[in-house]
Image (tube, helix red, strand yellow):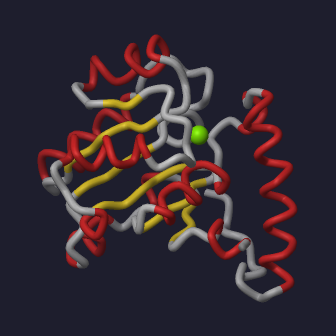
Amino acid sequence: MFERLLPHMRVNTIYDINLHTLKEQGKRGIITDLDNTLVGAREPLATPELVQWLDDVRDNLGFKVVIVSNNNQTRVGKFAEPLNIPFVHAARKPAGRAFTRALNELGLSAEQTVVIGDQMMTDVLGGRRMGLFTILVRPIAPNDEGIMTRFNRFLERIALSRLRKKGLWPEEELKKS
Ligand SMILES: [Mg+2]
C-alpha cells in the first residue's frame, strides 16, 4: 500500500521542475498545492520569484494552472485571485472530488496533467489515485505546519521507512538548494 504514496518525481522546489521535459511528454496542465509548495504556509501572497515563474509557466510554456488546497476560501482566494489562478479550496485531499473538479477547470485529461505538492498523504496519494503524474517538493516552511499536517508527516515517516526498506526510495537525499 505504501507504493501509493510514492511520487513519480522528487525535487527540492517547484523551480527545479523541468517543465520542458514534461511538455515533451504531453503534459499541459498543473494542479498545484498552495501551502508549503508555492509559498510558506504563513505567507499570504506570492513572492516576486513565484509570480515570474507562473508567468513563464503559463504564458511562455503554455501550461494551464489550477490551485487545489485543503485550506479555506479566505486563505486560498486571497492568494490566488491576484494571480488570476482558478482554485479549489477546502479540497479534502486525498479525496478525488477536488481533483476531478480541477481537471474539469483545466479542460484536460489525467494523462495530460501533473500534480505538485509537498505532502505524500494528500497531494501524492490523491494524485496517484486519479492517475496523475505526481511531483513532490520539499515543504518550504516545515515549522509552520498545522496539526493535521503534522499528523500526516508522522504517517509519512512510517511510509518512508517502509519504502526505504523496500529500496523504493533512493537513499541519497536531494541536495539542499
Ligand atoms: Mg501543502
Nearer to us in this view, 101 or 52: 101
Q: Position of residue 47 (x, y in %)?
A: 42, 28
Q: Indicate whether 75 appears above or below 20.
A: above
Q: Quadrant of the N terminus?
A: bottom right
Q: Position of residue 78 (x, y in %)?
A: 39, 13
Nearer to us in this view, 86 or 98: 98
Q: Residue at x 55, y 25 (%)?
A: 71
- The quadrant in which residue 67 appears is top left
Give the quadrant of ligand 1: top right
Q: Indicate whether 89 appears above or below 54.
A: above
Query: Left or right: where does residue 27 sit relative to residue 18?
Result: left
Q: Indicate whether 72 appears above or below 132.
A: above
Q: Residue at x 52, y 53 (%)?
A: 13
Q: Residue at x 53, y 55 (%)?
A: 126
Q: Quadrant of the C terminus?
A: bottom right
Q: Outermost residue, bottom direction?
A: 167
| Total numbered badges shown on the rendered structure | 0
- The quadrant in which residue 3 appears is bottom right
Q: Position of residue 12 (x, y in %)?
A: 58, 58
- The quadrant in which residue 136 appears is bottom right
Q: Residue at x 48, y 58 (%)?
A: 127
Query: Left or right: where does residue 103 sit relative to residue 147?
Result: left
Query: Left or right: where does residue 157 sit relative to residue 105?
Result: right
Q: Position of residue 9 (x, y in %)?
A: 52, 71
